[in-house]
């Protein structure tokens, strides 16, 4: 039987197209399940409609309330294995022909074989990353890593340049909105007015690629103008530079319009040609074939209950209104206000803002990790059901008790002061933990240690922090201060 391939969000590029008949379904119910960032809803709808326009007469394009309206009763459909547990249950319950997943450098079979060989050993990112490079030959010189080192992380931790407002780089390549984007904006306006969707955040202009051609242009812009400085400043933040040297390619990769192996090969070619330093190239490659593939495979390996059943630190506080409403104006701490403001404006923040500003704040205050994971998925343009559980439940909130990270990523204001230019304009002092100008991160760090000591005391990597806590002369006052501190 000649089957029609149903392609879903996350499968909107050429790597999912083998030349046969295609089907795309735009189901409005998807956008009404949770409160969602308007820029994210716009991006998904724009990507769907642009792909349908590209495929022309070769695609069935349906705009309906629910997927079942089109899929139920069809016996001629096939699908590349979808990217969430819910979607996989849906297609299997209807007996669709399922092809192996695509869009990652490592296949599910490859990962299963690697994990099976490890026995009882932990599935460490660094081990996985090295195994992928050996298997693929990416950034390898025979059996040795290019440049003589596997990992250049130590070279990629520079603080932002003193006195600089920006990194001084050309603007990233930006897409130009078209009639499809105008139609998306009109529909979102109407759906919001009808009350069928609950959207938050700013919308426009669209800043992320949704087609293969746009993604290629964005990749070329990154390689030509930003890759060289990506490595040194990948952890740094400047108030006047929301993109820094980052690629902005996570959204098109997660939409499926940009093949990650092609991205990596393009970046590695810059190193081979002598146009980009090994530290920047390796740092970027590690994010794509290391971390991105790693969290995809752990999503399946750890099981569906990973995101709902893990709360190792007993964190149960609801997310504050300022997060839910993206109300950065109501936040006093300058670094957090800047990060949440960036999410409101763009539906995006770079990885250190996510981990060490937003995530660190939530970790210290004991926000419910399941609520936080859902928030990250719905508020970020690159948020997907598979990408956020390991990032938030594991890496950011340590709710899995150490499956992903061996210790919590908690830090005081000193780290933020070193890696950003945001503390100087803040009413709080990163060096102070007690009093009216006590930094909520600095004081919050010690209050977090106090709260979690009974759970984490046996963690060998926490011995030094807990020794410092024991010596803290004003421990009780700091803990009481943070317990009573109101607002953000």
Image (cartoon, grey):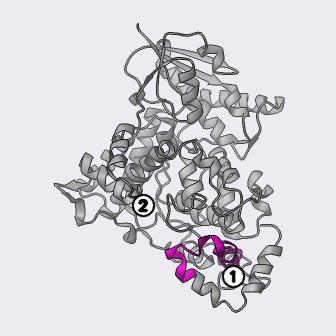
Depth order, front residue of 172/8: 8
Q: Which residue is mark 1?
A: 429
The secondary structure type at the circle numbered 1 is loop
Res. 474 image quadrant:
bottom right
Magenta part of the protein: which range? 440-465
Side of 117 where 411 appears, left or right? right
Q: Secondary structure at mark 2?
A: helix
Q: Which callout, 1 or 2, points to the residue nearer the camera?
A: 1
Which residue is at 33% across, 41% downward?
110
* Number of marks drawn: 2
Quarter of the image for the C terminus: give it: bottom right
Q: Which residue is mark 2?
A: 230
Instruction: Single out the residue that lies furthest toward the front.
Output: 120
In the rendered view, would you say 41 is above or below 419? Answer: above
Relative image position of residue 273 (x, y in whole percent): 23, 54
In the rendered structure, the answer to whether residue 144 lies left or right of residue 203 reads left
The earlier-in-sequence mark between 1 and 2 is 2
Within-10-Å neighbours for mark 2: few <14, some 14–19, many 20+: many
Q: Residues within 10 Å of mark 1 (few under 14, many from 20)?
A: many
User: Seen from this angle, which residue lies furthest left?
Assistant: 142
As displayed, is residue 480 above or below residue 264? below
Image: 339 above or below 15: below
**Residue 299 counted in the magenta span:** no
Asked if the magenta segment contains residue 452, the reply would be: yes
Who's the residue at 63% across and 42% down the image? 205
On screen, residue 338 versus residue 82, left or right, reads right
Image quarter hosting the N terminus: top left
Instruction: Say which quarter of the image contains residue 276.
Output: bottom left
**Residue 37: quarter of image:** top right
């Amino acid at each position: 039987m000649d089957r029609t391939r149903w392609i879903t969000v996350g499968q909107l590029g050429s790597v999912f197209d083998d030349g046969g008949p295609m089907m795309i379904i735009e189901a409005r119910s998807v956008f009404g399940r949770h409160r969602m960032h308007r820029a994210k809803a716009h991006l998904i709808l724009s990507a769907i409609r642009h792909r349908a326009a590209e495929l022309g007469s070769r695609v069935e394009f349906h705009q309906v309330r629910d997927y079942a309206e089109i899929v139920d009763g069809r016996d001629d459909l096939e699908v590349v294995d979808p990217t969430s547990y819910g979607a996989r249950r849906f297609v299997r319950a209807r007996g669709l022909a399922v092809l192996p997943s695509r869009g990652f450098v490592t296949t599910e079979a490859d990962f299963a074989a690697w994990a099976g060989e490890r026995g009882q050993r932990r599935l460490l990112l660094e081990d996985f990353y090295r195994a992928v490079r050996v298997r693929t030959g990416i950034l390898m010189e025979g059996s040795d890593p290019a440049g003589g080192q596997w990992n250049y992380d130590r070279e990629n931790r520079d603080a932002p340049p003193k006195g600089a407002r920006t990194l001084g780089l050309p603007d990233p390549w930006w897409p130009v909105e078209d009639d499809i984007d105008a139609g998306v904006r009109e529909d979102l306006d109407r759906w919001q007015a009808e009350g069928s969707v609950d959207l938050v955040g700013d919308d426009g202009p669209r800043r992320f690629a949704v087609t293969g051609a746009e993604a290629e242009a964005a990749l070329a812009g990154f390689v030509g103008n930003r890759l060289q400085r990506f490595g040194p400043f990948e952890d740094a933040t400047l108030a006047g530079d929301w993109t820094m040297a980052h690629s902005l390619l996570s959204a098109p990769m997660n939409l499926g319009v940009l093949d990650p192996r092609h991205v990596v090969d393009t970046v590695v070619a810059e190193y081979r040609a002598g146009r980009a330093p090994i530290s920047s190239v390796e740092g970027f490659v590690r994010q794509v074939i290391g971390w991105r593939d790693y969290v995809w495979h752990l999503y399946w390996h750890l099981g569906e209950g990973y995101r709902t059943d893990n709360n190792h630190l007993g964190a149960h506080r609801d997310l504050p209104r300022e997060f839910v409403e993206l109300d950065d104006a109501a936040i006093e701490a300058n670094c957090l206000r800047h990060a949440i403001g960036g999410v409101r404006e763009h539906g995006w923040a770079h990885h250190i803002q996510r981990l060490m500003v937003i995530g660190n704040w939530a970790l210290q205050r004991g926000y419910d990790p399941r609520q936080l994971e859902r928030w990250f998925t719905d508020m970020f343009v690159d948020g997907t059901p598979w990408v956020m559980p390991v990032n938030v439940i594991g890496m950011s909130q340590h709710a899995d008790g150490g499956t992903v990270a061996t210790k919590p990523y908690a830090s005081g204001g000193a780290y933020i002061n070193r890696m950003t230019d945001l503390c100087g304009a803040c009413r709080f002092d990163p060096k102070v933990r007690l009093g009216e100008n006590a930094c909520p991160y600095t004081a919050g760090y010690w209050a977090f240690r106090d709260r979690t000591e009974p759970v984490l005391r046996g963690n060998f990597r926490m011995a030094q922090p807990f020794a410092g806590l024991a010596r803290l002369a004003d421990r009780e006052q700091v803990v009481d201060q943070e317990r009573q501190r109101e607002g953000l």
